[in-house]
Image (tube, rainbow, N blue to C red):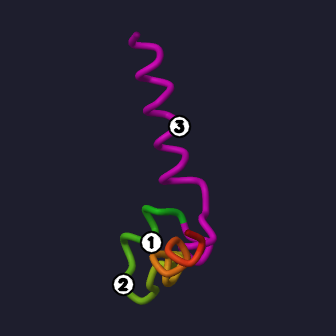
């Protein structure tokens, strides 16, 4: 079990410190949290309730 926890910890570290994200303007999550000029992009669909009701 300790090996799995270590693997998960390393994966999270890579995800947050080394992997740039398109929604964060190609910054890592850690870099994004340290700055205040850029706003994170969101891709939430608009009017999801209307689309669900229209298909019924």
Of residue 11 and residue 42, the one placed in the foreground of this image is 42
Residue at x 59% of width, y 78% of height: 25
Q: Which residue is mark 2?
A: 36
Q: Which residue is mark 3?
A: 11
* Numbered disc 2: secondary structure: loop
Q: Residues within 10 Å of mark 2 (few under 14, many from 20)?
A: few
Quadrant (top left/top right/bottom left/bottom right) for the C terminus: bottom right
* Numbered disc 3: secondary structure: helix
Start-end of magenta stretch: 1-27
Question: Quick check: 26 above or below 6?
Answer: below
What is the CA distance from the residue labelled 3 to the residue labelled 2?
A: 26 Å
Residue at x 37% of width, y 70% of height: 33
**Which numbered disc flags the more N-terminal residue, 3 or 2?**
3
Left or right, residue 43 beside residue 38: right
Residue at x 57% of width, y 73% of height: 23
Residue at x 49% of width, y 83% of height: 47
* Numbered disc 1: secondary structure: helix
């Amino acid at each position: 079990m300790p090996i799995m926890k270590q693997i998960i910890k390393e994966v999270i570290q890579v995800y947050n410190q080394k992997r740039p994200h398109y929604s964060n303007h190609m910054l890592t999550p850690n870099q994004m949290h340290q700055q205040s000029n850029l706003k994170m992009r969101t891709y939430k669909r608009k009017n999801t309730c209307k689309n669900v009701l229209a298909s019924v």
